[in-house]
Image (cartoon, rainbow, N blue to C red):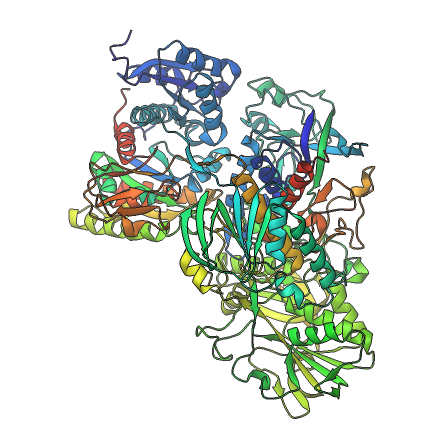
Amino acid sequence: MSTVESPDTNAPKILIITTIASSYTGANTVGQARAQYAPNTYIMRVPDPVMFPEDFYLRCFEKGFSGIIIMSSGSDCPYEGAYGRLSARVGRVYLTMREKGIPTNRLKLTTVCTVCKHAFLKEIDDMQKVVREQAA
Amino acid sequence: MSNLEPNEPHVGVYICHCGGNISDVIDVKRVATELGLHPNVVISREFPFMCSDAGQKLVIEDIRSGKINRVVIAACSPMLHELTFRKTLQRAALNPFLYEHVNIREQASWVHKGDHEGATQKAIRLARAGVEKILLQDELEEIQAKATKHVLVIGGGPAGLKAALNMAARNLRVTLVEKSSRLGGHLHELDTLYPSGESASALLAKLLAQVNESPLITVVVGTTVTAWDGFVGNFTATLSSGATVNAGAVIMATGYDHVIPAGGEYNYGGDPRVTTLPKLIEHLKTSAGKPLVWNGVPVKSVAFIHCVGSRQTEGVHAPQADGKVNDYCSRVCCTAALHSINVLKARQPDLDIYDLYRDIRTYGRGHEAIYEQASKNGVLFFRFTEDAQPEIREHTVVVKDILTWGEEVEIPADLVVLVTGIKQGAVGELIDMMKLPVSSDRFLQEAHPKLRPVEVANNGFFLAGNCQAPMDLVESSAAAGAAASKIAALLSKDYIPLDPYVARIDSEKCTGCEACIPECSYTGALFMNEGTKKAEVNAALCKGCGACVAVCAPRALDLAGWSIAQMEAMVDAMVTEVPA
Amino acid sequence: MKYDTLVIGAGIAGLQAALDLAEQGRQVVLVEKNPSIGGRMISLSKVYPTLDCASCITTPRMASVAHHPNITTLTYTEVKQVIAQPDGTYHAHISKKPRFIEEDKCIGCKRCEEVCPVYIRDDFEHNLGAKKAISIPFTNAIPQFPVLTPDQCTWCGACANACPVDCIDYLQEPRDIFVEVGAVLVATGFELTPFNAKPQYGGGVLPNVITSLQGERLLAPHGPFGRVLRPSDGKVPDSIAFVQCAGSRDASLGVPYCSRVCCMYAIKQAMLLSGSLPTADITIYYMDIRAFGKGYEAFYQNAKAMGINFVKAKVGRIRAGEDGNVFLRIERQEESSQPEEMNHDLVILSLGMKPQWNPKTLAWDMETDLDGFVKSPDAPMDPATTTCAGVYACGTATGPKDIVDTIIEAGNAAMVVGNHLARGNA
């Protein structure tokens, strides 16, 4: 088997938190369409990112993730009140990040639906730029 | 072979080639070899098609041989085959939740075609994360709630009657509670029904006969629900009679009230020539075939004014009792008014009828023909806008008609019929007692207009008819049938199966700080135990969003199958370097 | 094969009814003539009045149906004949069309599609895009099997060579399936009223006059162009018009009835357009705005507040303007009646609904009403009943209706079918 050595192998890693209801399927849609993005992206699927305590995100940064994209279901969220709670929580994570001197653009809360192919790729693109700039 | 104690997790890892779909990009041999180095992984294989019979057989044999008691398969998306492999585990008599599906196709090989090394490393990390997750996984069991095969229907109008009949047809016992003294609701008021023209009384008589004949339906009239307890599968309602009803589910079929024009709107209440459509229909019902006489005076001309109490605008219309205007469309009034107009015209062809409207909304099957018939009958239509309401004068109505380019037209009218809308009935006490969600239009709120249009977010509550939104008889009947359909499924077994992915609490760790309680959006799902002063979860009511988990400082709360410890272990695996 | 119920049509009505019946423990055979389940709804952009993504609501339903142990789904199959039996049951003859692949082998990998050299019009995109002569019908299709279009295939053999599981079968023939069922549910849905019904509107002739379903695809997040542009030259339109009642409320077209959904979908598309093209002028030419459902009036008022122009006018004629633009000759029904000619970049005809399928093509005595839709003789109390005992109908098979009303009717139909089966008539 031929392998192509990639300059991206040791690229800074991005964690993508997706929801079962929306964005995880969205990520599959991107695959079904064979759109391409870099493999330094790790997709985690959960019922809803509202479950994560604030320190979870900080721990991810500590352990070695350079960027985190939370792809929530937004208004398509099947859980009552979850999106409001999530965005408030992420707001508090930003405060802590600021205190700790972690650039806040390394964490992004966004909404991706089951067919939001372009939005998915754009979010990854944007975060790639952020983590590259900071690695440089 | 392995140094693991028998009770420790022994993981089998399987990497699928997907016939080249994965293996052309990802070095599956290397992934399998790398995963085999994990201390808990006792088997690590790659295989052309894991979903094939041969692939599944491989897993079953490995489980049956006693070598493994946890399974990780790295293949396509779990949306495709997670269920397939859970069933495979079941066939091998292993708890199906001891399985983790890792997506290395849609989210790896298909999207990293040009970077084989990167994709392979990613696959190794994702598969390792799968192993870490499954190591911390419990044997989840489906939660089962008691299913009381008895349904409470609140409201004895056509929707309630229809719902009760439907459920009785499935051998479910029904208690039908009606607060007034008789069944039938607003069907009593109606004369003939559009578009068929059949008699409302005859239809009601037929419905009531069917209800009376059913041995499974208990009717209680003149009765209200005064207290409420329990949850899906096992509710207890206390009735005003003192009796209690034990029910597995409840259908709200509480209907609607007519809007009464507020504060002298269009001189209603002051001018005897001004009435409402429901009153005209009542009159038509009791004066079959006769020419129209109102307050002893023969009527030569009638003006209908639409959208009274509907489609209101703040600042233009007087607010309702709660201070808000009715900004919604009442859906049924356009066709109901035009149907009555045609009935009048059939009786009295020389009657002059003027119809003052904003938009004619004859949307339903057969409705447009009623509108056309009215036009053919010589009804004159005038269109007004919300900010220029028609004005009632002594013998006339004045309307600024935009169909004639805003000209002010004076219409003779012996009788003015206000086409009044409909509003939520007097169900405030029920809403408070049952903690039911309400929409901004004050009607009861469904869980989701498309995914769950007749269900309330609170498990076990269903909606039928006008308590949810204005609808006509066809639509109410359909809603009643749809609600009954959901209950027929819910109560089809002796228990109600519930998703195991709910919040769990370790009471040893719970400090009783109560931080989690306000995070929960679902009434009764998470509460403080007064005795132990610790939080408790009612699995039957928890929806598994995990909002409570995030705020639990001592980490006593977790979502079954999605614990924070599992997620952290996955993160650690994802960032662990892979040897080149 | 024996089943409790045959459901004809796997759009949102058939999907919901099949799921409800299956959840009640009934065995369902669900027959869909298209290669994927999901019906019209899966091709929509977002849905009113919540602006939920249509795919996000439909996909989980499709998956639940596909995985349900009590549902057998037959896609790319057509019901040829349904024959009533003396005992009240039905025998159905179903024909499976050839996809030219062996479904039990195919892994949905798209290798065949990647190597196929022939591009054909993409019917899922309503001809706004192209696809390969062998291709999976659309991204989230279920099942993920490709279909070979024999009329346009050059039989070059590239797909057969590329297939890793050797599942291409160029000689595949239609296959007959016979089922015995206790009841039949017709959920055959709608099609748009003909695009060219009013030749004076230029439908099918003027490239920048498009159908409302093409409008949906333009706005879909996974649509043909990935953004809104007009078909003739790819220009991003600055001025877009909707022509309401373009196929409905017009006895001369044989569609005297109101199609019930066009006002709301036009308002929705207008709102989505104004979201993606904030500077564009959007006008809706209408007769009456029928925003009658729950939350619909507020949705309409929001659209007005957003600056969408609502003009009560009759559109007489649509003709080609300059540079691909479109001229609409209108007669206002308010303020002034002077005929005016309006210039727009793109025009969407709000076409109505007509029945997708005429049940009379089958040998049974199920009647249709004057409007051509399946007759519901027992409405208002039993809207799912037809003139055939043991045969029921729901959704747009019984007249135009929106998704909410369709899903509710499907639930009701499942109840009524279940009642029929429980009575032991089957």
Q: Nearer the viewer, residue B240 or B528?
A: B240
- Determine the image quadrant of residue C401: bottom right
Residue B529's image quarter?
top left
Along the line of sight, which residue is nearer the eye, B54 or B438?
A: B438
Answer yes or no: is residue C408 visible: no
Q: Judge whether residue C423 can be spotted in this image.
A: yes
Looking at the picture, tell me which residue is in the foreground, C71 or B179.
B179
Total numbered circles: 0
In the rendering, at what x and y percent does residue B347 appear?
A: 81, 75
Q: Quadrant of the C terminus of chain A?
A: top left
Say if C91 sits above or below C357 in the image: above
Task: Tell me: C23 left or right of C348.
Answer: left
Locate residue C49, reporting x and y percent. Answer: 53, 57
User: Which residue sits furthest top?
Assistant: B1
Quadrant of the image containing the N terminus of chain A: top left
- Find the residue positioned furthest to the left: A100
Q: How far from the left and from the top, in percent, is residue B412? A: 72, 88
Name which residue lies at 54% across and 85% down: B264
The residue most toward the bottom is B394
B314 sits to left or right of C418: left
Image height check: is B432 above or below B100?
A: below
- Give the image location of residue C293, x and y in percent: 58, 61
- Above-or-below relation of B84 to B265: above
**Front residue (pair B294, C121):** B294
